[in-house]
Image (cartoon, rainbow, N blue to C red):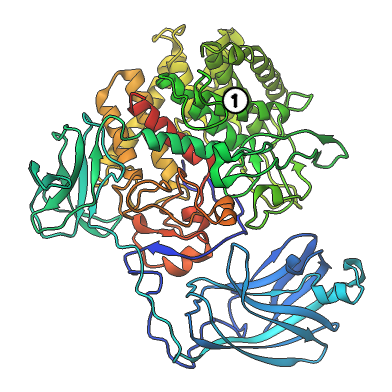
Amino acid sequence: MTRGTLLFRVFLIMAVPVLLVCSCFTAVTAQGELIPGQELLKNGDFSSDLLFNLYTESGGNAALSIQNGELQIDVNKIGRVGHAIQPYYDGFRLNEGVEYLLSFDAHASLTRDMFIRIQLNGGDYHAYFEQQISVTEEKQHFSLPFVMKEATDPAPRLCVNMGFVDPMAAAGLKPEDIEPHTVWFDNFSLTIKDVSGLVTDDSGVKISPIRINQVGYLPGAVKTAVITDLDADSFTIVRSPHGETVFEGTLSAPVYNPSSGEMIRIADFSGLNMVGKYKLITSDGTVSEEFPVNRQVYDKLLRETLRMLYLQRCGMELEEEHAGIYVHPVCHSDLAIVYGTNQKIDVSGGWHDASDYGRYVVSGAKAAADLLLSYEMNSTLIDNIGIPESGDGVDDRLQEARYELDWMLKMQAESGGVYHKVTGQNFPGFIKPQEETEQMIVSPISNTATGDFAGVLTLGARIFTDSGSPELAALSSTYLAAAERAWTYLEEHRNDPGFTNPTDIVTGEYPDGKAGDERFWAAAELARFTGKDIYRSAAAEMLASGEVTAELGWVEMGGYGLYAILSDQALSKENEAYIMAETLLSESIQRIRSGISVNSYGINRMNEFEWGSNMGIANDGVVLLMGAAIFDNEALRASAARQLDYLLGENAAGYCFVTGLGTISPTYPHHRPSTAFGATVPGMLVGGPDSSLEDPYAQNVLASCFPAKCYADSDQSYSTNEVCVYWNSPLILLISALTGN
């Protein structure tokens, strides 16, 4: 994934702080000295930069500025709920047991009630401290002491709920009764008052200096471990639990890794092929966690990562037999309104995209494509992951892909164009899926959604034809016809602008200013399946234009088109389009391998880790696997396996980045069902390190981290610890292609 791919997913919902990985912290409670009288806010007198921000929703409309040395909020429409207008401040911490003093001045152009809060910045947003205040035309000074009675929070939020608050409703008022007005604040201060009750906590994740694939290894695989900052020069592998030495080796010379700030040595024990459970011990006595070597080592991993997609299904009842504790009735099944019209349509089904319950065509297309390709690269039957369709003799990867593709059919308009997404106006709270009852809105058609639709429906049509399932094969003609109608729409709307959110919808945007790569993918898939010259010519034309890349993220989908061309057995290797595609894929592989060669962790990242870097690293592995298949190159396959090792624990953060797997895995992902059900869904690949620190939690607690360690196991840190179906999908593809399952 290119840097910034996810930057435009506007996540205003965040959640509970828990654990972090950073070179400057040992645990979430690490802190400087707490001094009575210490000021925790910056520029509370508004004499310089504006550090407050403004959140609006549910009809709230306001503007925030500094005027005459005061914070000024011009309320245009008060909205329908208390937090419809919410000025807020991030960037401080509250320590358990400490007494604080919050003070400020306030006045307004009319008398009104509001609530000052310091709250959890996500989850249920409950207040650590809340006070109703009545603001009048006369400036008042408020002085409000409170004690932090909950666990230390390194990234809470100070905010003012000044939308349509409960006292207004209790007085018989309606939102339309509240005229536009202005509120001013000044001299905001949050100071430490008394530290005598401070509760200290030294708990935290202890990361081993031996970074290893925590799930384990296939017998014939390359096997390495990264050893960090240890005074050791050799190692042994012992059988667990008896301690019998089965392998001895010499560590590589130490090399400084600037992305993690560590001196690194490599332990290579690829010669260990015996089935068993083992531990690695360095010559200075440091012992790794236990790891297995066997042929079934990734079976559970594959089941759980696939089952995650089932648990993200929308529009159907999830029953206990298959969903365990994550049961819920049918959700989001009411008719949705097509934006800007009175038309209502059925768009039930599909996968909840990520932490939220929105459904998005462009991201869903990538996820479904990865499942379909995972089957194409390894069609050994997988029919036991524990979904309702398991045990019917049809591969579960295809069953899951079908669930998404059938939903996409509902997102196609009569014109052939495809609606971009279906969501509410706002992100929901951290609630169960059936509890989001806001009116669903179908956002306008986009060329990117239409191109992705045509590409993935054609891919599905081709693979379902040869799946051995009469039921799936029968869908092939329906999928292909829909894809060709989408192609016709694309041809007629080449110059349409890219998608941006309508002004009153704030859910994930997935914006993309150019649709050439999506159109190329569609043409390449249609050419491969139908053999029609119209599609071959279109694909060749776009290749020659120079706008196609070999990437596999939802922004750049050209890599799927390249693979379609290079896998097309009807296309001569001397064909000009084939040669161009081969060159682009080769250049991409070379860039990836060049980056891998200078990073001791074996990944193509160094100084920058993008939002969703784990997906990007999984995608790199998929590109390498594509190259291995096209060029019959086992070295590329081994490099792809190294990407899997990284995701499963051989990384600077020291985590197996898949929930519920490995020795240390994320416990608090940014994921609404996990929070709402009170238990982390297993099998979810989290986003991973994000060196740009793109959420308030990360900015507050990871400010001094080395790039490779900018990760926090907190459901407040949506830029490092969220999950998405299209992050799981390349991992599923990697596992499927690298194993014999």
Q: Nearer the viewer, residue 263 or 390?
A: 390
Residue underneath mark 1:
402
The secondary structure type at the circle numbered 1 is: helix
Horizontal side of residue 271 vs 180, given as left or right:
left
State whether residue 555 appears in this view: no
Residue 32, above or below 245 = below
Where residue 582 sits: x, y (%)?
39, 20
Residue 724, above or below 153 = above
- Which amino acid does the dot numbered 1 rest on? Arg
Q: Which residue lies furthest to the front in this view?
A: 321
Q: Residue at x 15, y 39 (%)?
A: 269
Where residue 688 sits: x, y (%)?
42, 51
Horizontal side of residue 707 vs 418, given as left or right:
left
Horizontal side of residue 92 vs 474, given as left or right:
left
Q: How many labels does the image show?
A: 1
State whether residue 470 appears in this view: yes
Q: Quadrant of the C terminus?
A: top left
Callout 1 environment at 10 Å: few (<14), some (14 to 19), or many (20+)? many
Q: Which residue is drawn at 44% across and 30% down?
A: 550
- In the figure, residue 157 lies in which quadrant? bottom right
Where residue 290 sits: x, y (%)?
23, 48
Q: Nearer the viewer, residue 737 or 533?
A: 737
Residue 481, above or below 602 = above
Where residue 646 sits: x, y (%)?
32, 44
- In the figure, residue 690 lies in which quadrant? bottom left
